[in-house]
């Protein structure tokens, strides 16, 4: 079935009724809760709400769990969202839809839902899942929009797996070239949904998110899609270093390409099910391009190279990002742990070099100085078998 | 064998002797002539000359055929190059190597060579080959650095095939993210050599071009590599339109990705031997990135969109490119002919839309308005089988 807009929703007498099933195709069966209400979470809620109001298989109402905050005027954030239909703190000026209901009570927010959209900072996921154990409906489906991973000695534990393991539910992922503020103003964009087994479920998620300005494709490759979203931040550091040294577009394109090759090779080494074609999707090459053109990792790395590495990433992050966090540096460290644990540094010269630059072991210029490794055929061909 | 620098050349008593074979590994066997001496041709000669002087399998001397011109001071261009070791007109300020000998006599320039590097504007290739028939040594190998194609009803005729057909010699191609002026100042870059059958020949070409700042990989896919170099210019037009309408990085990345998908699908439809992996090489994703970030096609398309399509591409080309030519618009037209001849427009919405915008049939904004086609699963899945 096409994940496209399917015209106006037919009138349904009891739109909130989830049990009546005599007209299955027009009876809403799916209730969606967005777990998270930051910048990207609010945009996701907007996309979703524009579809639930039109597509009969979904309930109009979209619950959005809000980590409660008190605004400077003393008002609660959740109340402000419900009064204005705007996330006044994290997405001001954008109407996210009257059918989005902000709810500061996590358990209450999820209790009716059978489709859960996780979109919180990645360090909060485990804590949230812990609170949700035993509180969600049977047969609930989840999707993660969260970029990040937990590194363990045996390899990375992806967020989707964490959700599946803790809650015992299937979890897809949605990643792509998705700068939240650009999608918020309805600029054309794309995303990729990765699923494990059930294509029908993935297509239902696609219908929930897809709009004429936000195209969604589905691929059977959860790990590939999710690793793209994580590893590209390491490449963005490399691209930022090249920018900071004014090395030009040729060099930047070469570094991005080598980065994409290492993303692909590492993903396939860690998860043999990962598909090459995933890296041609929005989550792969397009997200890499967006992140290396704009993006905060690129920005801080550029500043790092410009000052000749005399100021640390931590210091520059504090100065340039206004409280936002840099993922690339910590991901580079995690990737380095994975590589060194397996003795793979030599076949991943870019990933290895980025970490060694970040910790001050190598100068920024080293990012283009691993050519001897890269021209060594035995290494390249050793890597090629995974590419 | 690795295409890397292999240390200083051992002393050879008679380095110009091509017939003595008692110490094969240190007796120069290959003589190179560069056919063309523009901006990219001069940089290619510089790369090559830095290797022939070091690697014993090559003659030191590199001949460079120069289309003779009289400089403003009355001097001949070929003479000026030989006196200064600089191409004073097309690559001023860069020493291309004392062992590069400019030669305005085409037949004389090629008569000793058994490795010919073609790097002229694509419209001159047929005429040059016609003059070379019967004038080249047996077993000569060629490589084309020329981007472009001739469109015939039965499909595109690639430049490498034109050279092979007219001269009866094997022809590889070298393409990549190669802005000549950046390589001239030895900024880090990469390229891809595509070959048809003989990997050893391709690796010899790689050794001839490869330097620590210019990495070369080889792939068995002449058509894939060559089509990348041609089709990316159509995508660059699309990227420029997005820039001209200030649509942001998300949209630009999405358009570049859709463009890459169509490049891949069209190449595979036209030549079933084309490999997916080629599009991950420098000639694919990296060249696309460079061209869509800088590049003249992007620049003129940006100006076209900014003035709301009120001035033609021809007019803007004359104003903005100082005599250089725009390839994207004519390639878009040629691609459109291929598509319409086969009824494939619907499965290549980006290529089709670019041409229709160029000829004024659609507004620039149409570049992001083919979403209905793109979300139509039957079309996308129809295309997917070629991706």
Image (cartoon, coloured by chain):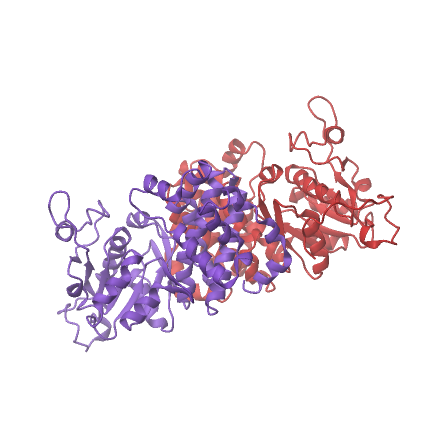
Chain colours: A red, B purple
Q: Residue at x 46, y 63 (%)?
A: B267
Residue B8 in sight = no
Q: Position of residue A292 (x, y in %)?
A: 49, 45
**Relative to B161, does residue A95 appear above or below in the rendering?**
above
In the image, taking residue A283 as reference, residue B9 lies left or right, namely left
Q: Residue at x 63, y 51 (%)?
A: A216
**Residue placed most toward the observer, A337 or A120:** A120
Q: Position of residue B262 (x, y in %)?
A: 50, 57
**Relative to A83, does residue A274 appear above or below in the rendering?**
below
In the image, taking residue B136 as reference, residue A122 lies left or right, namely right
**Residue placed most toward the observer, B27 or A174:** A174
Q: Position of residue B279 (x, y in %)?
A: 46, 59
Residue A70 in sight = yes
In the image, taking residue A288 as reference, residue B69 lies left or right, namely left
The quarter of the image holding the N terminus of chain B is: bottom left
**Relative to A69, does residue A32 appear above or below in the rendering?**
below
**Relative to A53, does residue A163 appear above or below in the rendering?**
below
**Residue placed most toward the observer, A50 or A251:** A50
Q: Residue at x 44, y 48 (%)?
A: B236
């Amino acid at each position: 079935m096409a994940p496209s807009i399917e015209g106006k929703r037919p009138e349904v007498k009891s739109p909130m009724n989830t049990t009546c099933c005599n007209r299955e195709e027009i009876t809403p069966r799916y209730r969606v809760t967005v777990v998270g209400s930051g910048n990207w979470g609010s945009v996701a809620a907007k996309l979703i709400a524009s579809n639930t109001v039109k597509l009969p298989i979904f309930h109009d109402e979209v619950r959005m769990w809000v980590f409660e905050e008190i605004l400077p005027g003393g008002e609660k954030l959740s109340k402000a969202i419900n009064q204005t239909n705007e996330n006044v703190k994290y997405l001001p000026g954008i109407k996210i839809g009257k059918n989005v209901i902000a709810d500061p009570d996590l358990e209450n927010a999820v209790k009716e839902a059978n489709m859960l959209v996780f979109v919180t900072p990645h360090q909060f996921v485990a804590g949230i899942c812990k609170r949700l154990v035993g509180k969600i409906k049977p047969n609930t489906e989840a999707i993660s929009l969260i970029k990040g991973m937990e590194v363990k000695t045996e390899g990375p534990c992806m967020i989707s797996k964490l959700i599946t393991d803790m809650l015992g539910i299937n979890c897809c992922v949605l990643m792509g070239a998705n700068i939240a503020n650009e999608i918020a103003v309805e600029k054309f964009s794309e995303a990729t949904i990765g699923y494990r087994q059930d294509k029908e479920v993935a297509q239902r998620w696609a219908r929930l998110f897809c709009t004429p300005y936000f195209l969604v494709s589905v691929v059977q490759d959860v790990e590939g899609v999710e690793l793209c979203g994580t590893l590209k931040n390491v490449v963005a550091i490399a691209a930022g270093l090249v920018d900071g040294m004014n090395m030009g577009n040729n060099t930047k394109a070469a570094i991005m390409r080598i980065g994409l090759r290492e993303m692909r090779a590492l993903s396939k080494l860690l998860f043999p099910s990962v598909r090459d074609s995933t890296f041609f999707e929005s989550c792969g090459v397009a997200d890499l391009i967006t992140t290396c053109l704009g993006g905060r990792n690129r920005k801080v790395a550029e500043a790092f190279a410009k000052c000749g590495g005399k100021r640390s990433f931590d210091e520059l992050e504090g100065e340039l990002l206004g409280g936002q966090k840099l993922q690339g540096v910590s991901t580079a460290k995690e990737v380095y742990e994975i590589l060194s644990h397996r003795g793979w540094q030599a076949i991943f010269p870019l990933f290895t070099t980025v970490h060694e630059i970040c910790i001050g072991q190598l100068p920024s210029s080293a990012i283009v100085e691993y050519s001897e490794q890269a021209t060594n055929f035995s290494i390249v061909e050793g890597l090629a078998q995974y590419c």
